[in-house]
Image (tube, helix red, strand yellow):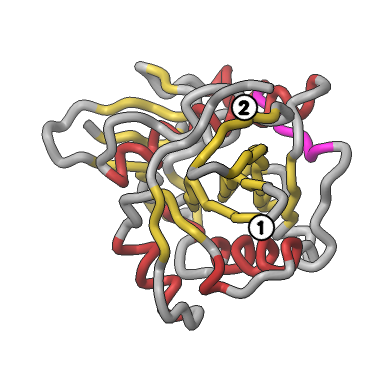
Amino acid sequence: MKYIFIDVDESRPTSNIIIKQPRKILYDDGMNDKISFVCEKCFKEFNKNDLSHLNKCRVEYPEEGICSKSSKYPSFMLFKLENEKGKVNNKIITNILNLSNFSKLEQKIGARIPNKRILGKSYSFWSVGIFYVSNFYCYIAFNYKNIISYCLIQVYSSFFMDKIVIRDIYTLPDYRRKNCAGRIINQILYDYKINLDNLFFSSPVSPKLKSLLKKMGANKIKEVYGEKFNIT
């Protein structure tokens, strides 16, 4: 199955010559020639190249949570979402849930992360005699008003320590090798006053992410399993 972005215009005239433009492929599993069309704004899937949907689909910036350290240019705006309150945040998280399906496909894992609405809720549990409270947050990068990358983190808090776990991080293919994920990770390090070797990552860590972390100077990649979902 090929997942292809809905395309408004597959060709453009230049000096009276029509030059065909390649379609943007979001993901190709190589199994067959079937095509599913995907909206580049909300990441819904369609059976046809539905231009009417694309023309009316809109994405807005969150009303708060801008990350001033990384958001230096209008072509890269980074926000940290702490909840899903309000129409805009709710819509953005819906879009992220749609996009997380493709993160799952690329990582070849059985279930997408995030697999349900979890922002703005606290989860508590005991582990080895220590009481923890955890919260989920989502960093979302925009190119103007199009979502291009996201990172879901889980923050474990206890009397003794805090632990930051990156549960899922994904960047659209066209924006890779442009340091989008690196900027998000650096923002997390800045926000929580930790260094790269103190971050934890949900297992399994993809080869692409391992490569990025090594380029960023990670000496060791710490992996953890599973989320805790006992709501307080």
Going by the numbered disc 2, the residue's amino acid type is Ile
Tell me the amino acid under the disc marked 1. Met
**Where's residue 36, x and y in %?**
33, 26
Q: Which residues are magenta?
A: 57-62
Q: Nearer the viewer, residue 181 or 162?
A: 162
Q: How many marks?
A: 2
At a point 72% along the width and 50% down the height, the residue shown is 159
Outermost residue toward the right in this view:
63
Q: Main secondary structure of the magenta part?
A: loop
Q: CA distance from mark 2 to mark 1?
A: 22 Å
Viewer-closest of 122 and 22: 122
Q: Is residue 61 magenta?
A: yes
Give the secondary structure at mark 2.
loop
Image height of 25 relative to 189, above or below: above
Q: Earlier in the sequence, mark 2 or mark 1?
A: 2
The residue that label 1 is drawn on is 161
Q: Residue at x 79, y 20 (%)?
A: 87
Percent x, y of residue 1: 22, 31
Task: Name the residue rendered at 54%, 63% in the picture.
Answer: 199
Name the image quarter holding residue 229: top right
